[in-house]
Image (tube, rainbow, N blue to C red):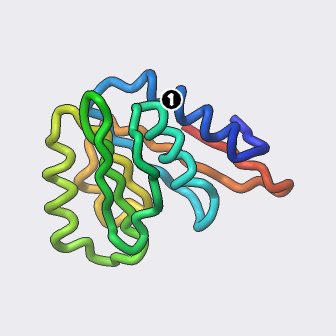
Amino acid sequence: MVFSSESEMLVFAENFAKNLKLPAVIELVGDVGVGKTTFTRGLARGLGVKTPVTSPSFTISKRYAFPSGNLIHYDFYRLDDPGLMAEDLSDSLSEPNSVVVIEWGNSVSDLLPSNHYRITINLTDDGQREIVL
């Protein structure tokens, strides 16, 4: 799927959220600035999160409540060794009513369940975003 605007990606992610069965784990793969947090904002909107979603690049994780659970958003970009954050992630993965989104998850890939979604977002030559599920 190719998206030519941020709003198109937001709508796609919102609809994706409406079809998720909880608990769900989503690994987002892509270069810096390609739209991983934008996808997460759309996902949050589809889940019913009312608070603004921002990148957890500096805080490593952020938690947002929605009517039937929690969206937990991780960004391991700055961590070569996740340390205590790996334990935090393990706890989040065991929450029954959660959607866990992980950006830059290479350092924690061994913790992810085998049935997680892996979504790759690529920037095309003409500036569009391509999503590969």
Q: Residue at x 62, y 64 (%)?
A: 33
Q: Compared with residue 21, is residue 123 higher up or lower down, i.e. above or below?
A: below
**Residue at x-position 71% and y-position 48%:** 129
How far across and how far down the image is residue 48, in percent? Answer: 40, 32
Quadrant location of residue 5?
A: top right
In the rendered image, residue 7, in percent from the top left (x then y), is placed at 69, 41
Up the image or down, 91 lies above or below 15; here it is below
Q: Quadrant of residue 11?
A: top right
Q: Residue at x 26, y 42 (%)?
A: 113
- The residue under the point 63% across, 58% down is 34
Q: Nearer the viewer, residue 81 or 22?
A: 22
Q: For the residue marked with disc 1, what is the amino acid?
A: Phe
Task: Give coordinates of residue 38: x percent, y percent.
Answer: 57, 51
133 with respect to 64 (left or right): right
For residue 103, side relative to residue 35 (left or right) = left
Quadrant where the image shows the C terminus:
top right
The one nearer the camera, 122 or 35, is: 35
Q: Secondary structure at mark 1?
A: helix
Residue that mark 1 sits on: 16
